[in-house]
Image (spheres, rainbow, N blue to C red):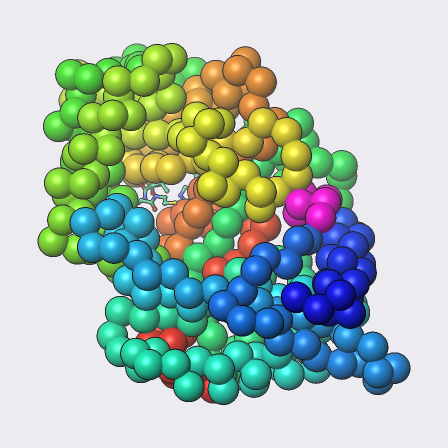
Amino acid sequence: MPWVVRDAVDEINRAVGRRWQGLDRLLPPTAELPEGCAAPFVTTGANGRPAGLAACRHEHVPAGTLHQTWGTAHRFSLIARLREADTSAALDDLLRQWRDHLAGLPGTGADDTAAMITWPARDVSGVNTLLRHALQPITVIAVRPARPEPAGLGPAGPEPGPAGDASMVIREAGPADLDAVTELEMGVIRYDALFGSAILRSATEELVRAETQAALAVRPVWAWLAERDGEPAGLVNVQPPGQSRWIAGMTRAGVTVYLQTMFVRPGERGRGVGAALVRHAHAVLGARGVDTTLLHYAQMNPLSAPFWNRMGYRPLWTGWEVRPSASLR
Ligand SMILES: CC(C)(COP(=O)(O)OP(=O)(O)OC[C@H]1O[C@@H](n2cnc3c(N)ncnc32)[C@H](O)[C@@H]1OP(=O)(O)O)[C@@H](O)C(=O)NCCC(=O)NCCS
């Protein structure tokens, strides 16, 4: 990268890091622009200086990986860094450049492709521009700090509730629970597939089973089952800090874990099972020194947003997509 562009990148990264901290203290403190498929797109402000930069990254997700269940097989992502509080004009310019770039690439009109952008949830100045370019909000990355945020910045954690009913037990999941945990994991994938945030593949169930088998062998345990009268009623499954590194950079520094699965069987919902599981998991995570928990939910899932809000989570990032990728306007 020429030094003039490198200087602009460093300067914008620093400015964006400061702007993000003003918007949301749980965003990462720095905003590094990663290497893209070519030189970054540049948009110029009224003063003639770069007002924003963006990198395009191409990801081809192999069949036979669980990663392909969580999105399209071919993903084109824009990572945008915009310095002004009102991002709309600069974002519009970068999206136009990106659209023209994608239009010139082979295969971007094919099924199983997406153009994607992950946008800070509180940076509301960009929302209308994203919509105008045909992007749709598909997923939310939600965050819960182990210690409540200062008043006015977000919901506090839930109040301790009354003790659960005696027929329900919460216990660690172990290797003998492979069938039950696989089925509950598949329950949430099937449900998320209704909202476009998961895509069921022919290999999904087999891959979930293999991943579950590995997760249940880990000690200490990071997955818990709720059982009513000895029958599995719900599951919460957390990736330990070492396995959560893939997403930990989306928030502040500290010990971060990713809450991978939360599922309560349909007939058991609305009776406090989910809350009891999450409260239990939070207590253990707190004791293990976890500072921040992240999770995904589908924007259109009618059950998850109110539930996670009650559990102390709130939106941090929104995942916007258009499928196929050449449909970006
Ligand atoms: C989301 C889910 C786990 C909630 O489990 P649940 O056992 O029904 O939740 P609970 O009964 O423990 O509810 C806990 C709190 O959330 C509230 N809540 C739960 N679902 C709600 C909904 N759809 N609308 C409004 N509030 C809701 C409850 O009223 C309760 O609040 P309270 O503390 O004020 O009483 C369950 O609906 C589910 O498995 N859904 C399908 C899979 C899914 O969406 N998983 C999450 C994907 S990220």
Say whether residue 274 is magenta: no
Visible in this render: residue 209?
Answer: yes
Question: In this view, which residue lies farthest toward the right?
Answer: 47
Which residue is painted at 32% across and 53% down in the image?
70
Question: In this view, which residue lies farthest toward the front?
Answer: 2
Which residue is painted at 42% across and 31% down in the image?
243
In front of the other: 148 or 40: 40
Which residue is painted at 68% across and 76% down in the image?
42
In front of the other: 208 or 44: 44
Quadrant containing the N terminus is bottom right
On the image, the x and y values in percent for residue 124 come to: 66, 66
Q: Please provide the residue range marked out in magenta.
A: 23-30
Left or right relative to 100: residue 112:
left
Which residue is painted at 75% across and 53% down in the image?
17
Q: Quadrant of residue 47?
A: bottom right
Q: Quarter of the picture for ligand 1?
A: top left
